[in-house]
Every structure is written in C-alpha cells, then in structure tokens.
Image: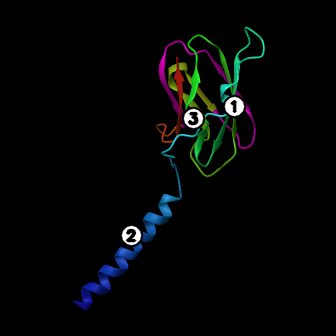
Amino acid sequence: MPFISKIIKPLLALTLAAAVLSAGQGCSKESKPAEPSAAATAQPTKPGEPRTIALSVTEKGYEPSPVTLKQGEPVKLVLTRTTDQTCATEIVLDEYNINTPLPLNQPVEVSFTPNKTGKLVYGCAMGKMISGVFMVE
C-alpha cells in the first residue's frame, strides 16, 4: 500500500494544481448576467439618431448584458476592451456579418439595426465562449 500511496497522492496533487491553474486562464464566462446600466438603456437624444450603447469588455465578459433593443431602431455600440485576460478581443455578431477587432483600451464603434425580435447572442471569435445578449423587442 505505501507504494501506491506514493504514486497516487502526487498524481492527485498535480491534477488538482492543473485544474486550479487552468480555471484562471483562457476564456472564462461569468454565469450570472450583469444588470443593465443606465448607459445601456439611454434613448437617443434626437429623433432619427441611432441609440448609443456603451459596452465594456472586462474579465467578466461583455458588460452590461443583457441589453434590450427595439426592432428597427438603429444602434451604435461603443465597445471598450479593458482586459487582456480573456479571448474576447473582438465582437462577433454573425446575423449582421460583424466581426470587429477590439484593441485594448480604445473605444470602437459598431452600428447595426436589429431586424427581428428575440434573443441576439454576440461574443468572441472562439465560438462565443464569452458572450453577451441583446433582447430585441
């Protein structure tokens, strides 16, 4: 038994250490959605102008999420990536052929007009492992 114990215990310790280290690296996803902020719910100041929505890309992902949009209302997203700790280095919105790089600490504008209602998922280029949601009414 002592021989097996000498082999099994170090293997278990290595496995546990690898699991702990890998949990803090690569793509991560916050399971609880953030509350929408006032910036995400602000309406355009003038009729006919697109609604501007400020989004941040942090270690928690795209924030805020979910954000409610209106079908047919043009939106201008202003995205600022503030971390290099995730794979969310762009925004991919397949339904609107959007795949835009997000340089670190630089605001990037992306405009589109939602043309159908429902849940619209956007995210990183790694299969949207890190994602956000627009609820289009």
- Tell me the residue at 78%/12% (across/down): 46
Say which residue label 2 marks. 15
Location of residue 127 in the rendering, given as x and y in whole percent from the top left corner:
46, 37
Location of residue 104 in the rendering, given as x and y in whole percent from the top left corner:
71, 43
Residue 76 visible here: yes
Say which residue label 1 marks. 38
Q: Residues within 10 Å of mark 2 (few under 14, many from 20)?
A: few
The vertical placement of 50 against 100, above or below, is above
Location of residue 132 in the rendering, given as x and y in whole percent from the top left corner:
54, 34
Left or right, 64 with respect to 30, comes to right
Magenta stretch contains residue 114: yes
Q: In terms of sequence position, does the residue under pointer 2 or pointer 1 come before the other?
A: 2
Q: Which residues are magenta?
A: 101-124
- Label 1 amino acid? Ala
**Residue furthest out toward the left:** 1
- Tell me the residue at 28%/85% (across/down): 5
Say which residue label 3 marks. 65
Q: Residues within 10 Å of mark 3 (few under 14, many from 20)?
A: many
Magenta stretch contains residue 123: yes
Q: In terms of sequence position, does the residue under pointer 1 or pointer 3 come before the other?
A: 1
Element type at marker 2?
helix
Q: Quadrant of residue 72?
A: top right
**Residue furthest out toward the bottom:** 2
Q: Residues within 10 Å of mark 1 (few under 14, many from 20)?
A: few
**Residue furthest out toward the top:** 48
User: Which numbered mark, 1 or 3, is in the foreground of this view?
Assistant: 1
Q: Nearer the viewer, residue 20 or 10?
A: 20
Left or right, 105 with respect to 113, comes to right
**Residue furthest out toward the right:** 46
- Label 2 amino acid? Thr
